[in-house]
Amino acid sequence: MINVTKTFLPPKNEYDEILNDVWATQWLTNRGKLVLELETKLKSYLDVSSILITSNGTVPLQIAVKILGENSEIITTPFSYVATSAAIIWENCTPIFVDIHPEYFTIDETKIEAAITSKTKAILATHVFGNPCDVETIEKIAQKHNLKVIYDAAHCFGVKYKQKSIFEYGDVSTVSFHATKLFHTAEGGALFCKDEKLFQKLYYSHNFGHKGELDFYGLGINGKISELQAAMGLAVFPYLDYILDERKKVVEYYNANLDKNKIKKIQLRENTTWNYSYYPVVFDTETDLLNVQTDLNKVSIYPRRYFYPSLNTINYINKEEMPISESISSRILCLPLYVGIKESELEQIVAVINKSLCL
């Protein structure tokens, strides 16, 4: 069986060795030694001004929306994982969708201003498959209209734009450290914020609002990561260059061998240092996609329709047509991409796709 992804696991003895500290201190949560060590290493590796590791990748979105959305309207993209829109609605804000760019798949910055109303407080945009939004134009729009910018950068570990970490853009950026991601802590995430005052508010908001043991800054929830999760991150950390190199090889194989006349790839924004996080392909029609998916499934190969469906069509959302997002969402498929996939398996995947498209 070849799935769309496979978790990278470090040697178990290396994870066990790190866990010895947990058993020695009996400190399992509440920002222990391992969480602090992992934050220090990631801050240096990613070259960011701040980092706060969280229990998952959705909690930082919820916290940012709660603080910056102010129960109002938030302009966002229909082409993302459901957590993006769900976080907005969960925090009693209203998502206002703007369609996407047909090549980059990110929010179409030229359509944002038309969606702004007196109720708009923020823009929540997704860097799709690690491909950056037009961060410069979005920043200009936000400054002009006094809006906050939140980036769902779940797929962006290691991505740089113009030699600068993508996490350094916007008022708040978030990332996922889920088990399926390039870097993971089994389950986890992080948020990034350059403004010290806002970062402090985000920080206490992820820890019930605590100011010491007996006092509170304000409202908060529990977004803390455990020492066990941090230990996994510390065990994965030394393999980051290896992980990136191996994923790059898979991407290069697909690039060289898939029939380019039958599929379309995402266009990476200029000046982007990408991280090989996903390999999405877009077919001419949904029928082509379904035929390819069926043929792959017959030989136990399981790509994923991702992102699907377009979020503006979900049943708890007020539906509004987003033709580009709906079209791409219906025709996009992410192919298997992970460390350890064999060349013979890649050969089989490519052969099935190319043959299916020629029938």
Image (cartoon, rainbow, N blue to C red):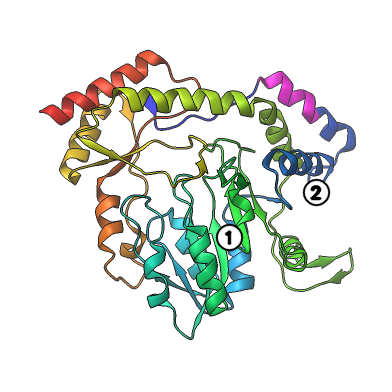
Neighbours of disc 1 within 10 Å: few (<14), some (14-19), many (20+): many
Q: Can residue 177 be seen in this snapshot?
A: yes
Q: Is residue 223 above or below residue 179?
A: below
Q: Which residues are magenta?
A: 11-19
According to the image, label 2 marks what residue? 31
> Percent from the top left, x then y, of residue 208?
75, 65
Q: Is residue 239 above or below residue 22?
A: above
* For residue 304, side relative to residue 228 (left or right): left
What kind of element bears circle 2?
Answer: loop
- What's the residue at 25%, 34% (across, down)? 293
> Percent from the top left, x then y, of residue 17?
78, 23
Does 323 appear in magenta?
Answer: no
- What's the residue at 60%, 36% (across, down)? 183
Residue type indicated by callout 1: Leu
According to the image, label 1 marks what residue? 61
Neighbours of disc 2 within 10 Å: few (<14), some (14-19), many (20+): some
Earlier-in-chain disc, 1 versus 2:
2
What kind of element bears circle 1?
Answer: helix
